[in-house]
Structure formats: C-alpha cells, structure tokens
Amino acid sequence: MDIREIQNLIKFVAKSGATEVKLEMDDFKITIKTTVDSGQPEITYLQHAPVAPVAAPAAAAPVAAAAPAAPAAPAAAADSDSKYITIKSPIIGTFYRKPSPDKAPYVEVGASIKKGDVLCVIEAMKLFNEIESEHGGKIVKILVDDMSPVEFDQPLFLIDPA
C-alpha cells in the first residue's frame, strides 16, 4: 500500500464518521483514529509488522502452552451471555440509536421491549432501515456505539428474554 492509498483511506474514514479503523495486512498494520470534534487533530498510526523468522522447536513449546489460557476468558464471558438473545445486524451500514439527532434513542439499557419494537436504524446506501426486535424482553447491553459502521451479522444488542 503506497502513501496515496493511505491518504485516500484516511479521507474515507474521516468522511464515514467512524472513530477508529484498524487494517491488518500481511506486512503492515494501520490504525486510524478520528474525533468528532473538529478541534482535535486526526491521529494516524502506521506500524510495519516484522516478518516472523522460523522459530526454533524449543521456543515453540512455551507459546503453545500459553495459547490454551487465552480462550478461557472469552469462553467464560460467552457462558454468562448464553442466557441472552443476541440481536444481530441484518445488513451492512451505519448504526444509529436515534431516529434523528434531536430525538431520544429508541431503546436504552434496562428498557423492556416487545416483539416488533424498533431498536435502531441502520443506514445503507442513503436508506434508513428500522431494525425491529424479533423477541420480547429487557435490553441488557448495547454492543455498538451510535454512528458506528456495522457488518452483516454483527451483534448489536443483548436481550434478556425472561
């Protein structure tokens, strides 16, 4: 990736409204952080990832021993969240919690909802799509920040069906 492509990526991220984007390729990593306040400067980090040398067999053993410990923490979090229903994004776009900037959010943490209630809006190609709940319950957690880009099937909300 040359400097012109990096500059175009920075401009695209600034226009998209995203606050942070990370891009990892085989030989480098780029993190672009922006702020909504125009008084703050844009911060761009460019980090070249070193090419990994072939590890000696003795060095591979400690790395392999450390690897099983890392998945234990996400597994514990997944077990505690397993009783909740996850509402996922049906499309790619920009996530909005409010119908317009001067209105209140559709839902807050702790709000009781029923099937068919609008939870958020996702903008895709200048069309605002209302995302409705397919389940009733109580909002436990909102997993995405307002005005953030979301991917297809990305978790948006956790709902306690009880």
Image: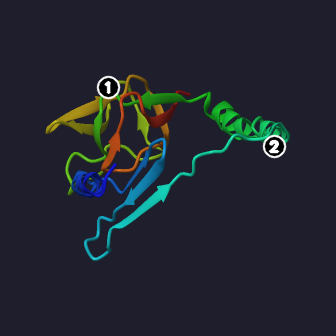
**Figure check: 53 above or below 40:** above
Residue furthest to the left in view is 126
Report helix, strand or loop for mark 2: helix
What residue is drawn where x is 40% and y is 27%? 153
Report helix, strand or loop for mark 1: loop
User: Badge 2 is on which residue?
Assistant: 59
What residue is drawn where x is 36% and y is 34%? 151
Where does residue 126 sit, x and y in percent of width and height? 14, 39
What residue is drawn where x is 43% and y is 62%? 45
Give the camera-side residue of 142 and 32: 32
Sequence-wise first label, 1 or 2:
2
User: What's the residue type where badge 2 is placed?
Assistant: Ala
User: Badge 1 is on which residue?
Assistant: 116
User: What's the residue type where badge 1 is placed?
Assistant: Gly
Give the camera-side residue of 39 and 131: 39
Give the camera-side residue of 92 and 53: 53
Quarter of the image that includes the C terminus:
top right
What residue is drawn where x is 24% and y is 33%? 130
Q: Nearer the viewer, mark 1 or mark 2?
A: 2
